[in-house]
Image (tube, grey):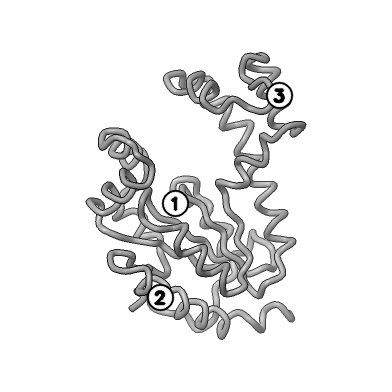
Amino acid sequence: MVATKTAQAEPKRPSNKSDKVVIGLTGGIGSGKSAATNKFAALGIDIIDADEVARDVVTLGSEGLVKITEHFGRDILLEDGTLNRAALRECVFNNSEEKQWLNQLLHPLIRKAMLQQIADSTSHYCILSVPLLVEGNLSELCDRVIVVDCPESMQLERAMQRDGSTKQLIENIMASQATRKERLAAADDVIDNSKTIEFLNEQVIALHNEYTRKYLSLIHI
């Protein structure tokens, strides 16, 4: 059921990453990344979620929020002192310079936090869930890459139903992401999420069993 590229004799070990086994997981909007990561978590696997990390690095009192406030002013904050995300989006949406400044601030903070969570993981492999893993060239941190895949028409329908967003907005988001072809080209393993949640879960279990067999011994090296 799971599409897997031709296996190598030994698990690949990127030379520029930690000794923890990291499985990258990605997919376009509406593809079902959360459903897949939830199943891996239910199997006892540590999940490093880039979206959660991105929120954490701008929480109240964080270095990220302090620098954002210094740059944009206190109008970027809500009354309770937390980040006004809507106001921040408005500041950077049509301003490429401000967007670049924000990315240069946040991307290193997010990467540092993800690496720390990877180092702290205790399961015999961990899942690094990153929506823009291909676009951000983060596959260099991973031993393997899983792509959760479904037809683009299904992505659009699911994302509209989930978020209550317009068709145009979801299409714009999809256009800003890697294409389906580009994601699949970067994949070592592909989870087909064009059917039922049970079908997806079966594929996750199969991959979990394969990774356990392949990588469990590495935690003792």
Q: Which residue is mark 3?
A: 81
Q: Residue at x 63, y 65 (%)?
A: 46
Secondary structure type for disc 3: loop
Task: Please report contact status of discs 3 and 1: CB closer than 8 Å, yes or no.
Answer: no
Q: Which residue is mark 2?
A: 203
Quadrant hosting residue 120: bottom right
Residue 21 lies, in percent from the top left, at 62, 69
Residue 187 lies, in percent from the top left, at 40, 64
Give the mark toward the camera: 2 or 3: 3
Is residue 134 or residue 55 the one in the foreground?
Answer: 55
Horizontal side of residue 5 vs 221, given as left or right = left
Q: Residue at x 25, y 57 (%)?
A: 151
Picture quarter with the C terminus: bottom right
Mark 2 or mark 3: name the one nearer the start of the chain.
Answer: 3
Amino acid of disc 1: Val
Secondary structure type for disc 2: helix
